[in-house]
Image (spheres, rainbow, N blue to C red):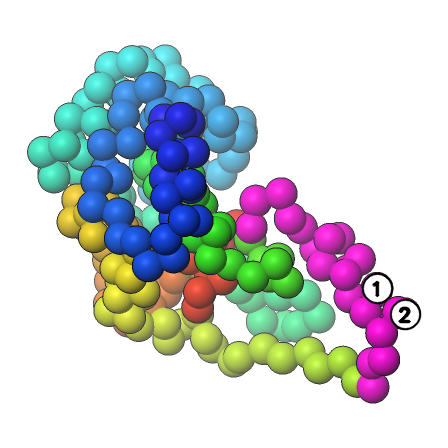
Amino acid sequence: METELLRIAELAKSDPKMKFTSLAHLLSEQALTQCHHELPNKKATGVNGTTKEQYGESLDRNIVDLVSRLKSKSYRPVPVRRMYIPKLNSDKKRPLGIPEHEDKIVQRGITKILNTIYEIDFLDCSFGFRPNRNCHDALKILNYYIEKRSVNYVVDVDIKGFFDNVVHTWMMEFLKLRISDPNLLRVINRFLKGGYMEEGKKYNTDTARWSYISDISQRISPLCSRPMV
């Protein structure tokens, strides 16, 4: 997969308007097995309570079945488990969603594909949710501009309720600017529509609720979105 991703990166860089028509095949048994191993241990579980360790007990069989469902278009993400964490300096709580481990595997695989294509397009001054970049890097750049450049003011801007109102249709249209593989787009759209479970009841995600989509939303976030943890 790594060799193919390097080739995709080269093509994306050489032609900013290129659309990629064949990407879903990169979610192979070998690639998804690697994604499983790369995921952190002892993390919160989804609605079925499956841990990484439990999934790994029959890893080969589970991955073969997963790839079979992806190829037959029968794979559907499990609704995520809704939980809440405190907001910094606020009495309010932020909603998060915890996916099942298998869905995290697929998300990580798709993340690698999206990274390869969109990292070429993102501006160097963008830091949010990008690989090999973090808050400390952004602060260093900010500190440089404040100390070395002529700066009169700094503006801190946030859009209230933005992630509760992202329109899925437009998110998919953004993706279609560079991706025209219907199989990959189908899987991403199913993550968007997967819903969430709270207190034993399933809720749909027809409007936005991007916050529960882990790595996938991180890759699209520099366009117009934001992920969960």
Measured along the vertical axis of the image, is residue 1 above or below residue 178? above
Helix, strand or loop: magenta stretch: helix
Q: Is residue 47 left or right of residue 44?
A: left
Amino acid type, mark 1: Tyr
Toward the viewer: 210 or 195?
Answer: 210
Residue 147's disc is: 2
Identity of the residue furthest to the bottom in this view: 152
- Identify the residue at horizontal 85%, vertical 80% (top origin): 150
Packing grade of label 2 (10 A; few <14, some 14-19, many >=20) is few
Identity of the residue furthest to the front in this view: 14
Q: Residue 191 in the image: x percent, y percent?
A: 28, 51
Residue 144's disc is: 1
Q: For residue 104, what is the image quadrant?
A: top left
Q: Is residue 178 left or right of residue 120?
A: left
Amino acid type, mark 2: Glu
Q: Give the range drawn in magenta.
A: 130-152
- Identify the residue at horizontal 70%, vertical 55% (top origin): 135
Toward the viewer: 21 or 133?
Answer: 21
Q: How far apart are marks 2 and 1 (CA)?
A: 5 Å
